[in-house]
Amino acid sequence: PAPTNEYEAFHRQVLRSLGWNFYSLFHCNKFKHEGVAKFAWAIPNELAMQAIAAATLRAAGGDKPGRVVDFGAGSGYWPHVLSQYVTRQRLKIDTIAIEKSLNLYAKRPDGTIGMPSGSGPAQRRDLWYDVQPGDIDELIRIQDQRRVHTLLLVWPPCWEDMAFEAVHAFHGNCVVYVGEARGGCTVCMCTLHVLRADPTYRPTDRSTDLPTYQTHASTR
């Protein structure tokens, strides 16, 4: 099938241009860094969007509108792709994006990203989506105002407790994790299961393979 978003198209172009060299860390890393800087750490595809939307609508129940919060959304590429999918499919799903370090996604004059901390947050023109600055307190505030059905965690880092805190603060019943398996560079889902100390919580494995670079192994 044809790619359904810009990042998927970029990934396929890299595959075509590198050929077998795609599986070499030396050759692949340059393109991986370019893709991560421009888009996101993980590459979304149509199957992932279908899975997120279906899980959210199930959590909302029946024909009721669903709501997703992407916590740690970066420049907002995943919410951007998800909102496009929702529009195409005419689904009733609202997507909210939160990022505590928006200054990391501000554009430099040369087009690269990552302004120093003192430079201020990224502007809307720097982002793929309307990402709101905030951390756990913002997640709690949003849930106090309206129900959130799905917590989306895309490539949550293993060196921070961001994902742990988000799962603990989440009041809904659907967590979507995008990242590597146990032992990788991200928080693994089995760890989140242990942390979700709720007697009504029932982990369900609905994994979807995503396009990856040689150094990544993303699975939703």
Image (cartoon, helix red, strand yellow):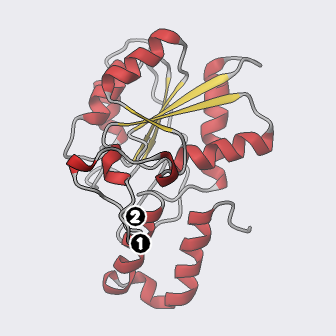
Left-right relation of 46 to 72: right
Q: Residue at x 36, y 14 (%)?
A: 198
Q: Nearer the viewer, residue 151 or 133?
A: 133
Left-right relation of 99 to 12: left
Q: Look at the numbered disc 2 and give the secondary structure of its residue.
A: helix
Residue 99: percent from left, percent from top: 38, 38
Amino acid of disc 2: Ala
Q: Nearer the viewer, residue 60 or 102?
A: 102
Residue 42: percent from left, percent from top: 45, 57
Residue 73: percent from left, percent from top: 43, 43
Q: Residue at x 37, y 23 (%)?
A: 138
Q: Residue at x 36, y 85 (%)?
A: 24
**Label annotation for residue 37:** 2
Task: Answer yes or no: is residue 196 visible.
Answer: no
Dots 2 and 1: beta carbons under 8 Å?
A: yes
Residue pointed to by mark 1: 34
| Residue 56 in which image quadrant | top right
Task: Answer yes or no: is residue 122 visible.
Answer: yes
| Image position of 206 with respect to 3: above or below | above
Amino acid of disc 1: Glu
Q: Nearer the viewer, residue 66 or 105?
A: 105
CA separation in Å, label 2 and label 1: 5 Å
